[in-house]
Image (cartoon, rainbow, N blue to C red):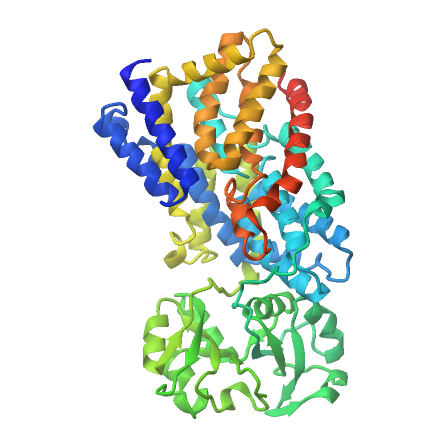
Amino acid sequence: MSTDQIILFTLFGTVFGMLLWGKFRYDIVAFSALMIGVVLGVVPTKDAFSGFGHPATLVVALVLVVSAGLVRSGAVLLITRTMIDASRSLGAHITLMGAIGGILSAFMNNVAALALLMPVDIQTARKAGRQPGLSLMPLSFATILGGMVTLIGTPPNIIIAAIRQESLGEPFRMFDFAPVGGIAAIAGLVFVALIGWRLIPARDDARITNEDLAQYIAELVVPEDSKHIGKRLSELLSAADAADVSILGLIRDGKRRYGQARSVALKAGDALVLDATPDALDEFRSALGLSLSDTVREEQLKAGGEGVEIIEVVVAENSRLNGRTSQTVGLTWRRRTILLGISRQGRKITTHLRSTELKAGDILLLLVPRDTAADVTEWLGVLPLADRGLAVTDNAKVWLAIGLFGAAVAAASVGLIYLPVALGLVVIAYVLAKIVPLSELYTHIEWPVVVLLGSMIPLGAALETSGGTELISGALLTLTQGLAPWMVLTVLMVVTMTLSDVLNNTATTIVAAPVGIQMAQTLGVSPDPFLMAVAVAASSAFLTPIGHKNNTLILGPGGYSFGDYWRMGLPLEIIVVAVSIPAILVFWPM
C-alpha cells in the first residue's frame, strides 16, 4: 500500500471506530477527519469543501425543508387523520401504519416521515390501551423500507445516484430504484405486518417519554362559513375521538353549556370547550376548519404577514398574570398574543378562557407573532417550557403544497429538470407562499447530516483516487474467487448491510459504492447491479438502534433495549437479501 492509502485507511478506520464508540457526535468526527486529511495532503486543498456543494448534500438538505412544508401545510395530516382508528386490531393497525409510513417515506425523508407518524402511533396505542413498543418498531422499519423506493426517500439512494453520475456519466433517475427497492419494501412490509411484530418482546416498563402530552383546556370557534353550522355537537364526537380530543361543552353568547350542549345545533360564533394536547388540538382544528378563540386577533396576525408560532409557558408567582385574567392584562391588544389553552392539573376551569383567573403553576398555550416569544415571556414574567416545535397547520395551502411538490417530482422523473434544481424551486415557492416561514427555513435542515456528507464525500473521493477502493474490491474478489457474479453481488450486499448496522448508512454508502463499481469492472460486468445492491443494503439497518436514526428515535418511547432489534431485524435483513438479489438480476442484468 502507498503512504496515501495507509493514511486514508487509518482515517476511515478511526472514523468508523469513533462512530461506534459514540462519545463524539458523528459530524464532528467526520469534519475532523477531513481537516486531518487536508493537512496530511491526502485530500487536495482545492477539494476540501467540495462535498458541501455536492448534489447529494444539497438534495438531503432540500428534502428536509420540503418535508417540513408538507407537514406544516397539512398535506400529511390530510392522509393520516382519515385512516387511523384505535379500534383496529394490532396487526391491522401495523399494516395500515406501515403502508402509510412506507408511502410517505418514499416521497419525503424517512426520518421526517417517522417523526410525523410516531406521535400518531403513540396516541393510538394510548387509546387502545397497549404498549407503544408493540407498534413503534414496525413503524420505524416500514419507513426505512419505504425510503428504498425512490431517489429522494433516503440519503444512500441520493449518494448512489451522484456517484453513478461521476463514475458513469449519468445518475439514476427518480424511480430507477423502484423495481428493486419496491419489491424489497413490499416483502419487508408483509413480513413486518404478519410476523415481525410478534417477535418483539413485551415489556412492562415500556413508556411514553413525552412529558409533552400535557392536556390543555382550550376553545375553538365555529367560523361564519363553517360547514358544521346546523349540526348537533354530538355529530362532531367521532372527529374529536379520532384526534384524541375531548369535547367538554359549548360557549354561546358568553354562557357555558355542558352535557345538554351535545344536542344543540351549532351556530356561527359558538366556542367549543376542549380538553386536548397541543398537537391534538391543532389536528382537530385543522380537520374541522375551526378558528382560534380570538378570531379577530387571529386574522390580524395572519394579515401582518410575519407568521405565528405556539409556545408553552408556566405562570410564575411574580408573573403579571398571577391572579389576573388574560383579558385584564391586555394580552391580545398589548402583545398581539392569543391564549389558546390552560393546563391546570387537579382543578376545573369553568369560565371562558379569557375570563379565567390564572394562578401560579398554570401552563399556558400561547399563539404569538413569530420571533417575539422571548419578548412576550419576559413581559409576562412567565417561564418558557422547552421548545417542542409546535406549529399551526395552514390548511388553506395544502393543495398548493402538494401540487408544487408533485409537479417537481414529475418534472424530475421524466428528465425535464435536474432534481436538486426542482427541489430548490419547490423550497423557494414554499417560502414565497409562506408555507415554510422564512425565519424557519434553515431550522428544518439537519446540519450535522449536512456536515457529515460534506466531510465524507471528499474523503471517499480521495480513497478512490488513491486506489484504496480498488484494494478493497480486490480483497473481496479474492474472498469470492471462483464464485458466480451473483454470489459476489450477494457477498457485497451482506458486507454492506453489516457495516450499515453498526455505522452511519451515509458513511457506509460513500465507501461501499465505489467498491461495488470497482468489483463490477474487475469482473467485466455492468456496475449498476452492484450499485443497486449497495443502495438497498446500506438502507437495511435493522439489527441495532444505532444503524439508522429512525431506530434511535423509537428507542426511548418504545421502551426497547439494544438487543430487541435483531429479533425482528435479522429475519427482515435475510428476506431483503433473498428478494433483492433476484430482483436486481431481472431489472439490472449484468
Up-down relation of residue 445 to residue 340 (above or below): above
**Residue drawn 63% across the image and 39% down it:** 569
**Residue drawn 48% across the image and 91% down it:** 357
Up-down relation of residue 547 to residue 289 (above or below): above
Relative side of 519 to 178, left or right? left
The single residue placed furthest to the left in the displayed view is 39
**Residue drawn 57% across the image and 62% down it:** 395
Residue 213 visible, this orientation: yes
Q: Nearer the viewer, residue 541 or 144?
A: 541
Q: Nearer the viewer, residue 201 or 185?
A: 201
| Place of residue 350 in the rendered image (x, y in percent of width and height, measured from the top left) | 59, 90
Q: Nearer the viewer, residue 123 or 4?
A: 4
| Place of residue 157 in the rendered image (x, y in percent of width and height, measured from the top left) | 52, 32
| Quadrant of the image containing the C terminus | top right
**Residue drawn 36% across the image and 86% down it:** 319
Relative side of 468 to 115, left or right? left
Quarter location, residue 122: bottom right
| Place of residue 97 in the rendered image (x, y in percent of width and height, measured from the top left) | 68, 51
Quarter location, residue 413: top right
| Quadrant of the image containing the N terminus | top left
| Place of residue 288 in the rendered image (x, y in percent of width and height, measured from the top left) | 65, 69
Residue 173 visible, this orientation: no
